[in-house]
Image (cartoon, grey):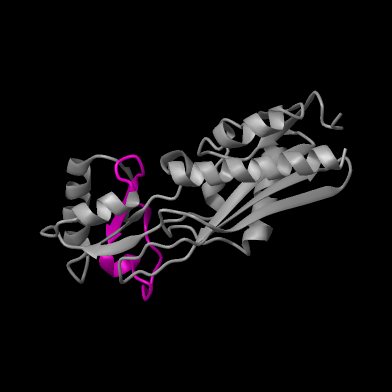
Amino acid sequence: MSRYQNRIAVLATMHAKEQAIAPPLRAIGLSLVVPPALDTDTLGTFSGEVERPGSPFEVVLRKARLGMAQANMVLGLASEGSFRTNAWVEIHTGGGHEILAFVDAERNLEIIEELRDVPTNFANRQASPRDDLSTFLERVGFPDHALIVSPGSVASAFRTRRIQPGEVTKGIRDIAALRDAVARAAAASTDGFAHVETDMRAHLNPTRMRAIAQLAEKLAERLRREG
């Protein structure tokens, strides 16, 4: 029997990761709660408005402890993902990196499980309002997988300032909304292009959610083995 039988841990997420993480942990008797008002975006956003303050391993532990502090609990979890990027050409990578942290403050224990080279749908490309995006949309699994659009001039790898919240449209899962976002972003850009990329937040990316579920299985098995 796991030492975490009939225990409760806090999961630091605002993107419904409990859907993937809770079932494997429930199998070893560990239940999860999610803080209702926790803002994990303060520790970085995929779209670039907030830079990640440290390595993925540092941030995932900080995120877990942030949830523990808010919920006043001694057990905590958090996950973090990283994806290869190229801001100027359309790409389709197979190289996501997912990590899942478990913190037990009673035992002064930190466990991190990871998956490297995880298959993802991550891709991005420049677009003008006149472009036919149908091939790109098919490749990234739109609309089941959402998109993010920002002005090309501020989303590029060579941007000289941080993206501002009002410049980004997230969670796009409708073709009319996509066309509107591309038109607005291109008009706001100094180069006349919009930057279109996959929204890698777990609740809007079924492929990533499946990877997180696989990682949760690894963590559950480790906690089961270690008693």
- Residue 37 visible at all: no
Side of 163 relative to 68 (left or right): left
Q: Residue at x 84, y 48 (%)?
A: 109
Side of 192 relative to 49 (left or right): left
Q: Residue at x 36, y 73 (%)?
A: 159
- Seen from this angle, which residue lies furthest left? 130
Main SS category, magenta section: loop
- Residue 144 visible at all: yes
Q: Is residue 30 magenta?
A: no
Q: Residue at x 16, y 62 (%)?
A: 128
**Nearest to the observer: residue 16 or residue 90:** 90
**Nearest to the observer: residue 113 or residue 128:** 113
Q: Tell me the quarter of the image containing the C terminus.
A: top right
- Seen from this angle, which residue lies furthest top? 6
Residue 127 lies in quadrant: bottom left
Q: Position of residue 193 (x, y in %)?
A: 20, 65
Identify whether 144 is placed above or below 155.
above
Q: Position of residue 4 (x, y in %)?
A: 82, 31
Q: Tell me the quarter of the image containing the N terminus.
A: top right
Q: Residue at x 66, y 54 (%)?
A: 114
Q: Is residue 145 magenta?
A: yes
Q: Which residues are magenta?
A: 141-165
